[in-house]
Image (spheres, rainbow, N blue to C red):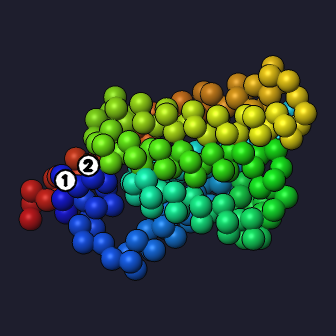
């Protein structure tokens, strides 16, 4: 275990091989798929409240930019092909090209951005981890909101009412939780290393 590593992945697996990376990418996609099933539909918007964003934040930070992008890219691709891994077991090209598709694409971009920030050690302290998670959340909305507006043919206010406002409190809780978990994980890695 290497606490000086660029990411948690490298701290726990200091000599990763192709098989290790493939398993981590698949595991990350699986974690996001499980979190997607924690879903609450809202009657006034096509966008559900889910656990996906929390999982995306952790996967991106833990795996780093490229593997985080690969993991969420796999999630996006497998769901589009028909695996029931999107929110509420939804799947298929219709979901990806529908009102929530922009958020799913935003997940992949956010994982890359958060992973890049984690590689610069933003995940080591609570304050910088929160900043990284907030940055990733903003990336998701920067892709998801314009996409939603186009798909529901709505103006700015309606788009924000359906795609942002109902999710702000939950997303803040998720990013604070993820921001607290990452520095704790690094401390655990250091503790385990000191016992060796």
Report the residue at 72% width, 45% height from top.
102
Please give left or right for residue 122 compared with residue 193 in the image: right
Classify mark 2: residues with Cα within 10 Å, few (<14), some (14-19) or many (20+): many
Closest to the observer, 4 or 175 = 4
- In this rendering, the answer to whether 46 lies above or below 88 is above
Q: Secondary structure at mark 2?
A: helix
**Residue 144 at x, y percent in the picture:** 70, 39
**Residue 23 at x, y percent in the picture:** 45, 74
Query: Is residue 181 in view from this perspective?
Result: no
Report the residue at 27% width, 52% height from top.
6
Q: Identify residue for label 2.
A: 186
Closest to the observer, 116 or 179 = 116
Which numbered disc flags the more N-terminal residue, 2 or 1?
Answer: 1
Q: Secondary structure at mark 1?
A: loop
Classify mark 1: residues with Cα within 10 Å, few (<14), some (14-19) or many (20+): many
Closest to the observer, 125 or 19 = 19
Tell me, yes or no, whether the two marked residues, 2 and 1, touch with CB atoms within 8 Å.
yes
- In this rendering, the answer to whether 180 lies above or below 155 is below
Q: Residue 168 lies in what quarter of the image? A: top right
Extreme-top residue of the structure:
157
Determine which of the numbered discs, if any, sits on residue 78 in the image: none
Cα–Cα span, label 2 and label 1: 7 Å
């Amino acid at each position: 275990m290497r606490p000086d590593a660029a990411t948690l992945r490298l701290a726990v697996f200091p000599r990763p091989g192709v098989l290790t990376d493939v398993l981590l990418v698949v595991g990350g996609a699986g974690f996001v798929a499980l979190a997607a099933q924690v879903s609450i539909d809202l009657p006034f918007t096509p966008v559900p409240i889910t656990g996906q964003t929390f999982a995306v934040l952790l996967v991106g930070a833990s795996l780093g930019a490229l593997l985080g992008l690969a993991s969420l890219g796999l999630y996006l691709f497998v769901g589009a092909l028909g695996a029931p891994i999107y929110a509420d077991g939804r799947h298929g090209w219709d979901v990806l090209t529908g009102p929530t598709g922009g958020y799913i694409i935003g997940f992949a971009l956010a994982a890359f951005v958060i992973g890049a920030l984690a590689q610069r050690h933003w995940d080591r302290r609570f304050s910088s981890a929160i900043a990284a998670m907030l940055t990733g959340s903003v990336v998701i909305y920067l892709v998801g909101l314009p996409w939603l507006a186009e798909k529901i043919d709505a103006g700015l206010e309606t788009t924000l009412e359906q795609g942002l406002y109902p999710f702000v409190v939950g997303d803040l809780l998720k990013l604070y939780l993820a921001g607290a978990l990452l520095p704790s994980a690094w401390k655990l890695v250091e503790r385990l290393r000191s016992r060796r």
